[in-house]
Image: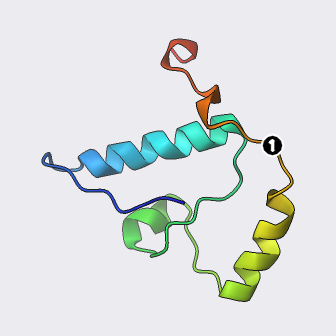
């Protein structure tokens, strides 16, 4: 789940979100719940999903392995 982000520097939260998405992709995650869809998230591929659809999509993902710590800065030049 992506939680609301804020920063003291303009657009720093957008950079943090891009890094989070990269880390999740690298680690094998298939879904990021952002709670709210806005134009920035839509540009990154976010879609609105009804609760029942979310549960249907989420159920098989609970059985998959993923590793949040698989991403290491040293591995990515």
Q: Would you place residue 19 above or below residue 52 in this image?
A: above
Q: Position of residue 64 (x, y in %)?
A: 84, 49
Point 78% across, 71% down: residue: 57
Secondary structure of the residue carrying tag 1 is loop
Image coords of residue 9 (percent x, y): 14, 45
Residue 14: where, in percent of width, then height?
Answer: 33, 51
**Quadrant (top left/top right/bottom left/bottom right) for the N terminus:** bottom right
Q: How is the image coloured?
A: rainbow
Q: Residues within 10 Å of mark 1 (few under 14, many from 20)?
A: few
Rendering quarter of residue 46 = bottom right
Residue at x 82%, y 68% (from the top left corner): 59
- Residue at far left of view: 8
Q: Quadrant of residue 76?
A: top right
Q: What residue do we see at 59% from left, 27% from top?
A: 71
Looking at the picture, does residue 25 appear above or below residue 47?
above
Q: Report the side of 25 relative to 60 (left or right).
A: left
Vertically, is 69 above or below 11?
Answer: above
Residue 55 left/right relative to 32: right
Closest to the observer, 15 or 70 = 70
Position in image of residue 8 (x %, y %): 13, 48
Please give the count of numbered marks on the rendered protein: 1
The residue sitting at 20% across, 50% down in the picture is 7
Instruction: Check disc 1 and report the residue beneath it.
Output: 65
């Amino acid at each position: 789940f992506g939680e609301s982000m804020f920063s003291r520097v303009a657009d720093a939260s957008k950079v943090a979100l891009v890094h989070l998405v990269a880390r999740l992709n690298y680690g094998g995650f298939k879904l990021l719940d952002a709670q709210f869809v806005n134009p920035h998230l839509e540009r990154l591929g976010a879609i609105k999903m009804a609760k029942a659809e979310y549960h249907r999509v989420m159920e098989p993902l609970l059985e998959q392995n993923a590793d949040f710590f698989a991403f290491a800065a040293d591995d990515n030049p």
